[in-house]
Image: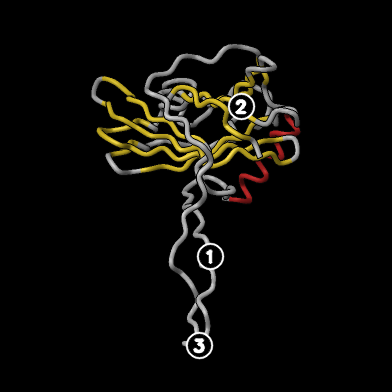
Amino acid sequence: MRKTIALAAAAAALAGCGMMPGAPQSGGGEERQSQPVPASTTAAAPTQKASEQPSQQPAEQPAQQSAPPQQGGVIATREAKVGGGDVYGEARVDVTGLKRQGRTATLTWTITALDGRVNVHNGFGSGPLDFTVSAVALIDPVNAKRYRVARNGTEQGAACVCSGTQGQFLEKGEASSLYAVFAAPPADVTKINVEMPMIGVLTDVPIS
């Protein structure tokens, strides 16, 4: 999977990523913006002799399902009521990384169902038959630019460089780790807003 994502990101840089000015769309839910949170640690110290002092315990890396590895920890979070009709629930998004690499930037996040049923299946796509996270966008409010998810080509219907979500309906307590690749914002942009369908906008997300 990591090799596939690396190749996809390189292709996105060659093909070019969409940058369109525009204001973020409205989203529901109460925003709970967090400060950077250090990764959790576990008691996983190696076996020691009785005469030795215990050493500092190594940090446990955050679990990733379908997203490439990132720096770890939660750098922004937001909760929202999502869905409608027969598919309704409450969800929390934890952004775990927004990292530049060359001419691209990779966003990683985890969505967790807090209550009810959360439609990840086509909830992040740009249409009812889009089973990806292609509708997620980065918004630079200072330069008035929107960065859309990169695609493997410029023709209509080119696949996005992002997670597939087909069949993902999360029940309470279930989570899914996702990613999307974008053209990298200018080097002087250190924070950016992340717009997500269903969830809304997470503001001032730091870029590393």
Q: Are marks 1 and 2 in contact (CB under 8 Å)?
A: no
* 125 left or right, relative to 3: left
Q: Position of residue 179 (x, y in %)?
A: 54, 38
The answer to whether residue 166 shows anywhere in this view is yes
Which residue type does callout 3 highlight?
Ser
Q: Earlier in the sequence, mark 1 or mark 3?
A: 3
Q: Residue at point 27% right, 26% down?
A: 88
User: In this orientation, which residue lies closer to the viewer: 53 or 93?
Assistant: 53
Which numbered marker is on residue 51? 3
Q: Earlier in the sequence, mark 3 or mark 2?
A: 3
What secondary structure is marked by label 3? loop
Q: Is residue 51 above or below residue 132?
A: below
Q: Position of residue 94 (x, y in %)?
A: 46, 38
Which residue type does callout 1 highlight?
Pro
Q: Is residue 148 above or below residue 120?
A: above
What secondary structure is marked by label 2? strand
* 172 left or right, relative to 106: left
Which residue type does callout 2 highlight?
Ile
Q: Which residue is mark 1?
A: 58
Quarter residue 154 falls in: top right
Quarter residue 9 falls in: top right
Q: Are marks 3 and 2 in contact (CB under 8 Å)?
A: no
Q: How many marks?
A: 3
Q: Residue at point 53% right, 41% down?
A: 36
Q: Which residue is mark 2?
A: 192
User: In this orientation, which residue lies closer to the viewer: 125 or 177?
Assistant: 177
Q: Are marks 1 and 3 in contact (CB under 8 Å)?
A: no
Q: Earlier in the sequence, mark 1 or mark 2?
A: 1
User: In this orientation, which residue lies closer to the viewer: 130 or 123?
Assistant: 123
Q: Position of residue 140 (x, y in %)?
A: 64, 21
What secondary structure is marked by label 1? loop
